[in-house]
Image: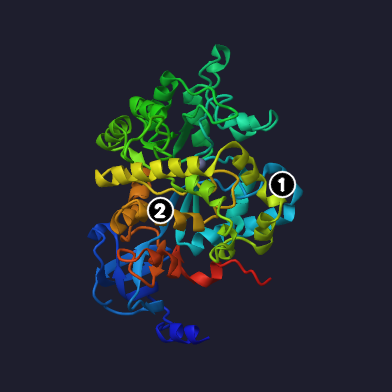
Amino acid sequence: MLKYFFLFLSTTIQISAIGQDLIIKNINILTYENNFKPYLGHIEIDKGKITKVKEGHPKNEKAIKVIDGKNKYLIPGLIDSHNHINLVPGLSSEQEKKYPELVKNYRKQLPHSYLYHGFTTIVDLFTTDEDIIKSFKSNKKHPDLYTCGGAAAEYQGYPMIYFPESEKFKNVPNFINSHNRDEEEKHSPKNAIKGIIERNGIVVKTHYESGFSPNKKLPVPSEKNLKLLIKEAHKNNLPVLIHANSLESFQMAINVGADGFAHGLWRWQTKSENDKIPLAVKNVLDQVILNKMAYQPTTQVMKGLVSLFDSNYLNDPLLEKVIPKNLIQFYKSNDGKWFENEITSESNLADMEKVYNNGIQSLSYINKNNGFLIFGSDTPSAPIYSNPPGLNGYYEIQNWIKAGVSHKRLLEALTINNAKFLRLQNKIGSIQEGKIANLVLLNKNPLEEIEAYNDIDSIILHGEIHKREIFEMNNKS
Ligand SMILES: [Zn+2]
């Protein structure tokens, strides 16, 4: 109660027939335009757009709502460029069918979980399921959602192989076929791009992944087809993001001229000595930096797996803010531990930790040498409960800081770099007149404290301001 009393004190509301929809005054503004140096100013918002950003006080306060942002920080709405909204963390596809109630509750909360953690734009890098997309957008308040319009993945390669025969064409309609001549024409890279555009994709996602056990020798796209795909994508002003995480796949992506990597380089395929990055890895990362390719570390892919071994993980108090209580209870049940039971028998914790640490070291190297970082959490990267929506982004943020990324470069990756990579910089990614008013109001300075990202006062979504609390999972009901 006391908390709300103070909130009330610091908020002034004025009603006016004319003027702007919203003014935030006395606010520390952090944005790309000012090289992320905070300055005290004000912002005016009307009809969902930023109409003015300026130092000092507003000339007048004619607005429906005026907020005093004293001691608070305003940053652009965060962008997470790697998500999979079709998957429910922790549920297998059989379990999704078996427990429709769990799925329903999760989907209802999903958009709010992202907003709760300040993500006002997310990109899905796989789904073509119109019902899933509609369900996400049917929530009155949801982050702006973009997709890749379906993956341009190799026929019967990763990830197409994981779908049952009856579902694979529906799930991967834009597949390319590099190894079967008869089919090649029909499923050419050109047709894949056509399909992506038809499905309103804003980025091309392709995969170079020969697989992991038990499917280790999966077909991958040919170099020729990857080049054709990229050429066709660029003709249509679409960036190409390639799923790669090994030396071999990174080298291929460099050779064919992809725009970015949907993962970090963590499969080193070579022994490291004295905890140093092996020369072969360094050489590849140097090319990534030299070619200014976008690097999306997705450290939570491996960290999420490692977290499954932490018996205390499910008691993280942040989890119940984004995941329905009955789903957390399911995670704690025997049935809910199916995935970890599978991987514990097949691999082991030390290996996963090693691979995670490789990823952190690669990120650290890219960062030190001024590589172009884009932020994506890969939520969820596997059907694991340790990649919860929104919160997984906050975990990812913390991993970057542990890797030595500066607070400024992190904020850059979360906002302007993602916007630039996705060709959305005219709409979002910074606090600039004319852009969509997607913003986050923080109680702390994110350039000083990483906890600022979990100390959000409000989220501004297309000009409408919402207290963070309204997006919290209501665990009492
Ligand atoms: Zn992914």
User: How far apart in space, not on screen, are marks 1 and 2 (Cα)?
Assistant: 31 Å
Colouring: rainbow
- Quarter of the image with the C terminus in it: bottom right
Residue at the (53%, 32%) spot, across then down: 195
Lower sequence index among marks 1 and 2: 1
Q: Quadrant of residue 454?
A: bottom left
Work out whether residue 31 or residue 163 is closer to the camera in this orientation and state it. 163
Q: Residue type at mark 2? A: Asn
Exactly how many numbered labels are in the figure?
A: 2
Where does label 2 land, which residue? Answer: 399
Compared to 256, does 23 lie above or below? below
Compared to 53, does 202 lie above or below? above
Task: Pinpoint residue 168: horizontal percent, then vertical percent.
Answer: 64, 31
Q: Quadrant of residue 389?
A: bottom right
Q: Residue type at mark 1? A: Gln
Q: Does residue 4 appear left or right of residue 130 in this picture? A: left
- CB atoms of marks 1 and 2 within 8 Å: no
Task: Pinpoint residue 403: horizontal percent, then vertical percent.
Answer: 35, 51
Secondary structure at badge 2 equals helix
Residue at the (60%, 36%) spot, across then down: 346
Work out whether residue 58 or residue 4 is closer to the camera in this orientation and state it. 4
User: Label for residue 95?
Assistant: 1
Binning the other alpha carbons within 10 Å of mark 1 as few (below 14), some (14 to 19) or many (20 upward) gives some
Secondary structure at badge 1 equals helix
Compared to 326, does 193 lie above or below? above
User: Label for residue 262?
Assistant: none
Residue at the (67%, 33%) spot, across then down: 167
Task: Pinpoint residue 95: horizontal percent, then vertical percent.
Answer: 72, 46
Task: Pinpoint residue 232: horizontal percent, then vertical percent.
Answer: 41, 27
